[in-house]
Image: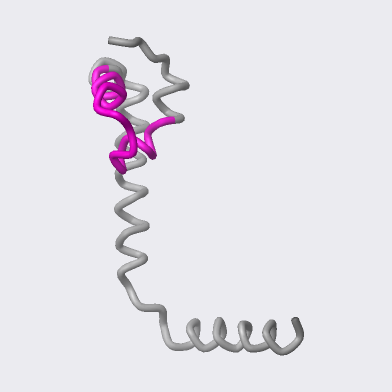
């Protein structure tokens, strides 16, 4: 199995979390995370970060924010 360093793992965590890697790459990253506290902490942080983003995307914006965004889009369309 190919060895990776912490920099490679931390750079690849996003793709790893979203299963955007080949199976052999996933196994390599999994093995490294299992044996590296620093990378495991980085992975855990990325998991929490992705969960927060997912929850935020599932929530509807407050009406005032939605109206401000729509107003700004109208202004941009009118004035180019």
Q: Is residue 51 above or below residue 43?
A: below
Residue 59: x %, y % from top left: 32, 73
- Picture quadrant where residue 13 is located: top left
- Picture quadrant where residue 71 is located: bottom right
Residue 23: x %, y % from top left: 24, 27
From the viewer's side, name the closer residue of 13 and 41. Answer: 13
- Residue 25 lies in the magenta-colored region: yes
Residue 22: x %, y % from top left: 30, 29
Residue occupying image coordinates x 42% and y 28% = 10
Residue occupying image coordinates x 44% and y 22% = 8
From the viewer's side, name the closer residue of 77 and 30. Answer: 77
Of all residues shown, which one is farthest toward the front?
Answer: 22
* Quarter of the image with the N terminus in it: top left
- Residue 59 lies in the magenta-colored region: no
Q: Is 27 positioned to the left or the right of 12 in the image?
A: left
- Picture quadrant where residue 68 is located: bottom right
Q: Is 50 positioned to the left or the right of 63 in the image?
A: left
From the viewer's side, name the closer residue of 2 and 33. Answer: 2
Q: Is 79 positioned to the left or the right of 21 in the image?
A: right
Magenta extent: 12-31
- The secondary structure that most of the magenta stretch takes on is helix
Residue 75: x %, y % from top left: 68, 87
Q: Is residue 59 above or below residue 49?
A: below
Q: Is residue 51 above or below residue 5?
A: below
* Quarter of the image with the C terminus in it: bottom right
Q: Is residue 26 above or below residue 62?
A: above
């Amino acid at each position: 199995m190919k060895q990776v360093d912490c920099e490679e793992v931390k750079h690849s965590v996003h793709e790893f979390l979203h299963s955007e890697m080949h199976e052999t790459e996933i196994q390599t990253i999994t093995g490294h995370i299992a044996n590296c506290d620093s990378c495991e902490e980085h992975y855990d942080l990325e998991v929490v970060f992705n969960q927060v983003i997912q929850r935020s995307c599932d929530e509807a914006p407050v009406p005032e924010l939605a109206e401000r965004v729509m107003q700004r889009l109208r202004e941009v369309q009118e004035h180019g």
